[in-house]
Image (cartoon, grey):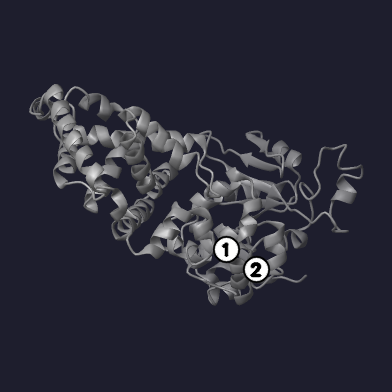
Amino acid sequence: MEAEYYRSHELGFDQSDISLDSFEIIQNLKSHGYDGLLVGGCVRDLILGLKPKDFDVVTDALPHQICKIFPRSRIIGRRFKIVHVRQRGRRYMDYIEVTTYRANPESSGSWIARVFPKSRKKRNMPDGENIYGTREEDVVRRDFTVNSLYYDPVEEQVIDYLGGIQDIQQQQLRMIGAPRQRFLEDPARIIRAIRFKAKLGFDLEHEMKEEIQQHAAWVEGLNSSRLYDEVVKFFNQGVAEESWDQIFETPLGEMLFSHIASGRKGGNSDRFMRFVRQALRNTDRRVRKGLPVIDSFFIAVVFWNEYQKSLLRHTGRGLREHDAHDSAVSDCLVKRPELLIIPFRVRDTVHEIWQMQTMLEHRDKGHIRSIMANRRFRAAYDFLVLRSTVGEIGPACMKWWTQIQEVNSKKRASMIDQLPDPKQARSKRRRRKNRSGRQHARSHANQPQDMM
């Protein structure tokens, strides 16, 4: 397999765009006689003029050899071994991933016959993983041609085996190999294809597009945690709104979020869909500003309307507020029929965000300081602002919580003192609840169906 070589300046980027840590690692690998290159999405993004999120290094050195070169490193993973190399003076979480060239298990030229002549079982090496090879064998195992580019920062040249440069220039996302076979090997590629289409704005090749429509159900075979991780990547890369639209152009939309898919078809979901879309736009703005985003907030948004409906059902059955809340959370995030399984850590955060909405609306003067000290306060407040934006609650409550965060301690104490006495407020709420309960018994007008 022959490669084409491009100078970095011909493609519009220079050494100042490269992570210094990754450059030093590659220099060190080369000084010890090994190959060392940047690979994948970082090379693609450099060519596109985007700022890479990560810089991944690939080499012909084996994991234990990499660790000998870099004392501040460790091998992670059992499915496929990766070395995390931490540079001097960096925090524990700051590391560069260094991997060894891989080969298909059936490849006769792979290193497995030379480096590991004994059986894989004796060396605890599962079939298809931790099988090392050459760069030419490594490149064909990657998913899309635009992700198959290597870059040598020492020689300042891009190495292209499969026409990835041309596909970038033509803004085309093309699978390496037959799409159906590659999707069958790893159904997560179906999700990644949709995500890269949204992120890059590239067109999917026709065959890949057809296979996604026909075989989206193959993602059901993915491990639940891996599926969740792949899905939430749609919403933390600055293209959440575009990704959302792309998902629902495929069968994945209904498979992952059936309650929303039915609402989109029903025509009575204007406010709820504005609610979701505004959240996606806000998320994209935060990513562009370099601010953190949490997947729990997105999950809280997507299932908010279902939670409200379930909460109304349980309170209508006479459950106390706290018990009704717990049951509604369980209905939406645990006992749900959809493919996407919500991890416990996420459910716990969503639980708090939803529960705090009632606290924020009630504004009991005895609880204000503890609410603001809660670690989920900021997320719950952002959620409240979002609800106010689409008209679900009036602006007064949102403005009050905004102001109390901006004033000094003396003014804050004054604002709290001006709130009504908690006992009087609870009495008024109880009377309102009784009136609304009698009205609800006569009519369903108060149900949150206008949100779906």
Question: Could you tell me which secondary element the residue under label 2 belongs to?
Answer: loop
Q: Please state which amino acid type lies under the numbered disc 2.
A: Met
Where on the picture, by quarter, is residue 184?
A: bottom right
Q: Are marks 2 and 1 in contact (CB under 8 Å)?
A: yes
Residue furthest to the right in view is 118
Question: Looking at the image, which is closer to me, 193 or 104?
Answer: 193
- Density class for disc 2 (Cα within 10 Å; few <14, some 14-19, many ≥20) is many
Question: Residue, x 13% and y 43% (percent of image)?
Answer: 396
Q: CA distance from mark 2 to mark 1?
A: 9 Å
Residue 170 sits above or below residue 61 on the image = below
Question: Could one spot residue 14 in this view of the protein?
Answer: no
Residue position marked by numbered label 1 in the rendering = 193
Residue position marked by numbered label 2 in the rendering = 175
Residue furthest to the front in view is 442
Q: Is residue 341 left or right of residue 413?
A: right
Instruction: Indicate the position of residue 32 as horizontal and vertical percent values.
Output: 73, 46
Question: Could one spot residue 248 in this view of the protein?
Answer: yes
Q: Is residue 132 left or right of residue 315?
A: right
Question: Residue, x 75% and y 47% (percent of image)?
Answer: 61
Q: Which mark is residue 323?
A: none
Instruction: Indicate the position of residue 314 as horizontal and vertical percent values.
Output: 36, 36
Q: Please state which amino acid type lies under the numbered disc 1.
A: Ala
Question: Residue, x 25% and y 29% (percent of image)?
Answer: 372
Question: Looking at the image, which is closer to me, 447 or 236?
Answer: 447
Residue 340 sits above or below residue 266 on the image = above
> Between disc 2 and disc 1, whose residue precedes?
2
Instruction: Indicate the position of residue 113 as horizontal and vertical percent values.
Output: 90, 50
- Density class for disc 1 (Cα within 10 Å; few <14, some 14-19, many ≥20) is many
Instruction: Indicate the position of residue 359 as horizontal and vertical percent values.
Output: 25, 32
Question: Residue, x 73% and y 42% (percent of image)?
Answer: 63
Where on the picture, by quarter, is residue 182?
A: bottom right
